[in-house]
Amino acid sequence: MNVSIDIFDEFGVGGGASGSSGGLLHPYSPKVKLLWRGAECWRESLRLLGIAEEAAAANGCLIKRRGILRPALSLKHLNILKDNAQNSLPSCRIEQIDQDDTRKPVPGLLVPLNLSFFMPEAISINPQLYLQSLFQACETEANRFHGRELRLHRKSINDLLELEGEFDDVIVCLGARATILPQLIGKLPLRTCRGVIAHLQLPQDIREDFLEDSPSILSDAWLAIKGKRDLHLGSTWEWNSNNYSNHVSMEETSKALEELLPKASGVYPGINSWTLAKAYAGLRAMPPLTVNGSLPLLGSIDHIIGDNRKCKFWLFGGLGARGLFYHAWLGKLLAQAVLFSNEDLLPSELTTWKKKNKVERQ
């Protein structure tokens, strides 16, 4: 099959909110409950990570396989974590460890209830390098076959109809920016949420607490450990923001640190000795809450754009803060739906938003 794919991204690969994320990857919610279709998403994410890691071999460290640790902070929280640990995936186990074992990789960590939950197979990645390496792998794969083309255009699309006539199918995967396209304004059940992440470093005159194999930490705030003296702290949640810029002002940075540092110091008091290197930000597109959690929005949007057009339009949006987890499996399913022009190949849980929106407009 001959396939030609054009990607339009004015910021370049990894230049948007996805490239600014914390990069912590595991198949569980913040309370360590298995996410919807967790096994499938986890398996496909690891497969794509393997492909990207091979492509990135000469470009730097893409993946840190140190696991992720979550201390229990309250009795209610502890019981939820215990229940969910019993139903964890064999490919991403949740282990209960006591205070002494918790403090071996992170000597300064507080364990209020003397029990933590450790995911040894969970990983931390460099999201921008991952996306760039994955694109590089796609280019290499396209070049291997006659009749397959992949092109990246550093430009924005301000109106979907300007693509009509040039393409058979258009997939809108603009994140929060999808909500400001003329054809989609007010028609997608998405809320924007701006998040700020702080990159912190430990001054050279202070002894480090983290070991070479220290895991990242989940708490009221998360700490993505990048090295002995290097970590990312996140994230803030500013709902209904219309600030699409990746730039973080001094005022916004100060407010973010005032919010994040007290949360982090509740489990790691040593965080107060670290200094700011840089702050990052991105605008998430958050989907509505369902009985299965906050699920992405997929499917044809011809009913919004117009059913009698020569080009078919699709949506891949609302990945929120879990794009790294959902993108691989759902991207594969959507590609199949587009190639076969069959929306029924998508899980019904991801297309029910269309029915609800139709009822609300009537």
Image (cartoon, rainbow, N blue to C red):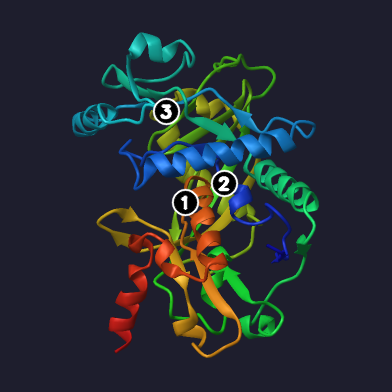
Three-letter amino acid code of the residue under disc 1: Ala
Residue 348, percent from left and from top: 34, 63
Query: Quadrant where the C terminus lies?
Result: bottom left
Relative to residue 79, is residue 214 drawn left or right?
A: right
Q: Residue at x 60, y 86 (%)?
A: 310
Vertical placement of 240 versus 76: above or below?
below
Q: Return the residue nearer the eye: 111 or 183.
A: 183
Can you identify the residue that label 3 sits on? 91
Mark 3 or mark 1, earlier in chain: 3
Determine the CA span between mark 2 and mark 1.
8 Å
Vertical placement of 169 versus 60: above or below?
below
Label pair 3/2, CB-CB below 8 angstroms: no
Q: Secondary structure at mark 2?
A: loop
Q: For mark 1, does the 10 Å Cα neighbourhood hold few (<14), some (14 to 19), or many (20 or more) residues? A: many
**Which mark identifies residue 362?**
none
Relative to residue 145, is residue 339 drawn left or right?
A: left
Three-letter amino acid code of the residue under disc 2: Ser
Q: Secondary structure at mark 3?
A: loop
User: Residue 276 appears in which quarter of the rendering?
Assistant: top right
**Which mark identifies residue 21?**
2
Mark 3 or mark 2, earlier in chain: 2
Q: Residue at x 75, y 53 (%)?
A: 142
**Which mark identifies residue 321?**
1
